[in-house]
Image (cartoon, rainbow, N blue to C red):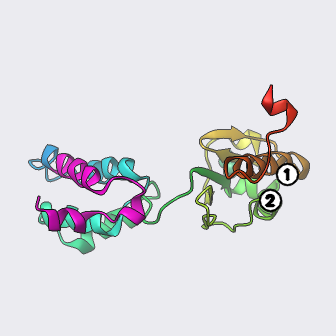
Amino acid sequence: MSETETQKVCCKEDQGLDTAELAAELAAILARHADDPGALIAVLQETQRLAGYLPREALREIARARRTPLSHVYGVATFYSQFHLRPRGDRVVRICHGTACHVRGAPEVTRVVTEELGIKIGETTDDMAFTLESVACVGCCGLAPVMLVDGVTYGQLDVSETRRIASRLAEEAAIARGEAAPSAEDAE
Ligand code: FES
């Protein structure tokens, strides 16, 4: 891949990663699946693992290398909820809005998390600390309402427990930014 192509594949500001390294890894992924016409999903999954989402230029490079219409690559990337087309925060908070969770308080959970983190569903904080997402049933309806933080499940949430968890997350982000000091409890 030429220098120019490398620059085109991935934008450093988008990734927060070394551009050349990322382009080389994408080239390796494409080479590994070059002989498998049915491997588009695997290519997208592996590409997403590089940066946490699928940058536009990476999708273009995948379409070019696999001789697949860009519209098809986009179609697959947007069809499956596992794929993300925009950068996501360091921590991903998902609130279940399946029927059981909705009935048992997901809207209140959402309201409290939105207040504490300062973002709505589908948004990412400006400092890239958090992304807030809505998901369909995650399969533990007996614990409804449910919220997942980086894959850890919190169930049977009420307003006060949700606020405790969300404010703790916000506090940890403030500490990471140097805007708050760890509590005595944290320092131990
Ligand atoms: S509806 Fe939320 S876990 Fe099933």
Instruction: Respond yes or no on whether mark 1 lies under 8 Å from ligand 1.
Output: no
In primary-sequence order, the first of circles 1 and 2 is 2
Left or right: 135 as drawn, with respect to 42: right
Considering only vertical position in the picture, is 39 above or below 4?
A: above
> Residue under circle 2?
116
Q: Nearer the viewer, residue 76 or 171?
A: 171
Give residue 10's position: percent from left, percent from top: 30, 63
Where's the C terminus, which quadrant?
top right
- Which secondary structure is most common in the magenta stretch? helix
Give residue 153's position: percent from left, percent from top: 68, 39
Considering only vertical position in the picture, is 119 above or below 47?
A: below
Label drawn at residue 40: none
Query: Was residue 102 drawn as part of the magenta stretch in this picture?
Result: no
Tell me the quarter of the picture where residue 107 sits.
Answer: bottom right
Identify the amino acid type marked 1: Arg
> Residue under circle 1?
163
Tell me the SS state at disc 1: helix
| Count of marks overlaid on the render | 2
Magenta stretch, residue numbers = 1-30
Tell me the SS state at disc 2: helix
Left or right: 89 as drawn, with respect to 156: left
Left or right: 45 as drawn, with respect to 82: left
Contact check, label 1 and label 2, Cβ < 8 Å = yes
At horizontal 33% and vertical 66% (from top left) the residue drawn is 11
Q: Nearer the viewer, residue 94 or 25?
A: 25
Give residue 42's position: percent from left, percent from top: 28, 48
Farthest residue, direction top:
188
